[in-house]
Image: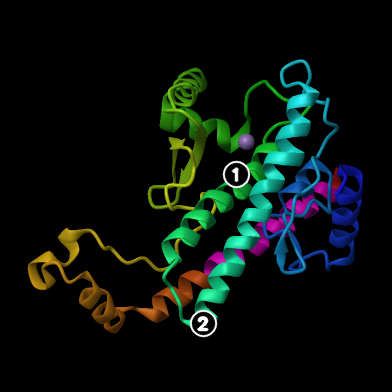
Amino acid sequence: MSDSVSRRELLSAAMAAPFLGGISGLALGADAGMENYAAFANGKYVLPPLPYPYNALEPHIDEATMRLHHDKHHLGYVNGLNKALDELAEARRTGDFNLVKHWERELAFHGSGHFLHTLFWLNMGPKGGGTPTGSLAKAISRDFGSFKAFMAHFSAASKQVEASGWGILAYEPIARKLLVSQAEKHQNLTEWGVIPLLVLDVWEHAYYLKYQNDRGKYVDNWWNVVNWPFVQRRFEILEDIVLQYERRMNEGARRR
Ligand code: MN
């Protein structure tokens, strides 16, 4: 499938979908003036179009790199993510979970790849550089001391990622604090970009006194203590916030 065909198909698929709810899930592209920037459409993850021309980040990032990076590498993640989800659906259908570790690894690798690249294209732009303003500037000063100190920290973390990976500025919602993280590779069985809803600690310290090496029994019994009303409430509120985020990003794009 050629680049131009796939991009045209993606754009028309995105435009055919309802503006809110049906596409994206992130709707970040609205801020780049692309209301149809979709990373998810019609039940499948899709490659969002690059929100600016391939040569727009020259001379800092060259056109050839952008073409390969977006059209080949990011597309590979999208395809791998859809494949992993299909295989996990098949495992649930048949009850055969023998390959669950393999497909969860694939999900983490390709899922993180898709979610992070979707954000990466948008957190760059042809009129980039400078410094942040407003509440983000204040939060950076508060949590890192100064913008200069943040830049030094983020740069060092990025340069010292062992082998492949990412430097990440992240929001920690308990202390409402900014953190810098290194993601080595990006698939340590976690999809960056997701928000946990329900977690089960399977470190030995969580069960060893009672269950010793029988983690299976601990997991089976754990279902008896899950606080579903809490999980339900967390899910509802987070979904509200994400929808509000999508709406406000889209409104912001229309005003410009
Ligand atoms: Mn990449």
Within 10 angstroms of label 2, few (less than 14), some, or many (20 or more) residues? Answer: few
Looking at this view, name the residue that lies furthest to the top: 59
On screen, residue 64 above or below 106? above
Element on which disc 1 rests: helix
On screen, residue 22 above or below 162? below
Mark 2 C-beta closer than 8 Å to ligand 1: no
Residue 44's x, y, as percent?
71, 64
Q: Quadrant of residue 22?
A: bottom right
Pointer 1 residue: 116
Q: Quadrant of residue 85?
A: bottom right
* Residue 127 in sight in this render: no
* Residue 167 in sight in this render: yes
| Residue at image location 65% in from the left, 61% down from the top | 82
Which residues make up the magenta segment? 237-254
| Residue at image location 57% in from the left, 62% down from the top | 84
Q: Earlier in the sequence, mark 1 or mark 2?
A: 2
Asked if disc 1 and disc 2 are in contact, CB closer than 8 Å, the reply is: no
Amino acid tagged 1: Leu
Element on which disc 2 rests: helix
Quadrant housing the C terminus: top right
Residue 28's x, y, as percent?
71, 49
Q: Main secondary structure of the magenta part?
A: helix
Pointer 2 residue: 94
Residue 27's x, y, as percent?
72, 54
Mark 1 C-beta closer than 8 Å to ligand 1: yes
Within 10 angstroms of label 1, few (less than 14), some, or many (20 or more) residues? Answer: some
Quadrant for ligand 1 reads top right
Amino acid tagged 2: Thr
Residue 125's x, y, as percent?
75, 30
Q: State how the image is colored.
A: rainbow
Between residue 63 and residue 172, name the one nearer to us. Answer: 63
